[in-house]
């Protein structure tokens, strides 16, 4: 009776990555991740920059924008927790497409908001 075949090659991923040269794929991946991080924080930065003008133009107290700032961070928390788990279950592509559609719809609705 033949025995089970032995595994001939074992790949140590850590060593493979450490010995590989930093090429165009790695550079492109790094740049794309950097751009994603910059754009991820842009909404909070833009709101912080425009908040004084919003307060002045709309005549609202500055404390009224507190929930607006909090809602953005709360949305990131919920998205990170639940979308990552959902992506593990059903796959990354459907979650990315769904999140993009949801974000697009919410952006359009935000532009039509008449109050804080």
Image: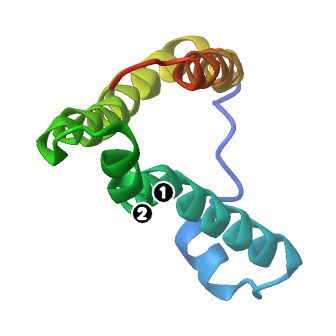
Extreme residue toward the right, this view: 24
Image quadrant in which the C terminus is located: top left
Labelled disc at residue 46: 1
The quadrant in which residue 8 appears is bottom right
In the displayed structure, 45 sits above or below 28; it is above
In the image, is 37 to the left or to the right of 11? left
Give the image location of residue 12, x and y in percent. 57, 67
Which label number is shown at residue 19? none
Tell me if mark 2 has few (under 14), some (14-19) or many (20+) residues whose alpha carbon lies within 10 angstroms of its own: few
**What is the C-alpha distance between the residues marked 1 and 2?**
5 Å
The spot of residue 88 in percent (x, y) is 50, 22
Which image quadrant for residue 72?
top left
Quadrant, the N terminus: top right
Residue 113, how many percent across, how many down? 49, 18
**At 20% from the left edge and 33% from the top edge, which residue is drawn?**
67
What SS does tag 2 mark? helix
Is there CB contact under 8 Å for labels 1 and 2? Answer: yes
Q: Which mark is residue 49?
A: 2
Residue 59 appears left or right of 105: left
Residue drawn at 55 percent across, 19 percent down: 106
Q: Nearer the viewer, residue 88 or 63?
A: 63
Q: How is the image coloured?
A: rainbow
Q: Nearer the viewer, residue 104 or 20?
A: 104
For the residue carrying disc 1, how many other residues have a C-alpha within 10 Å: few (<14), some (14-19), or many (20+)?
few
Q: Residue at x 57, y 15 (%)?
A: 109
- Name the secondary structure under disc 1: helix
- Does residue 67 sit above or below 31 in this rendering? above
């Amino acid at each position: 009776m033949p025995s089970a075949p032995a595994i001939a090659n074992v790949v140590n991923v850590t060593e493979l990555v450490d010995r590989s040269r930093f090429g165009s794929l790695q550079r492109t991946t790094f740049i794309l991740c950097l751009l994603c991080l910059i754009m991820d924080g842009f909404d909070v930065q833009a709101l912080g920059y425009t908040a004084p003008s919003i307060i002045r133009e709309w005549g609202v107290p500055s404390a009224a924008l507190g929930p607006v700032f909090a809602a953005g961070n709360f949305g990131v928390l919920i998205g990170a927790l639940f979308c990552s788990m959902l992506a593990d279950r059903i796959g990354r592509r459907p979650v990315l497409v769904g999140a993009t559609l949801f974000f697009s719809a919410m952006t359009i609705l935000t532009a039509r908001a008449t109050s804080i």
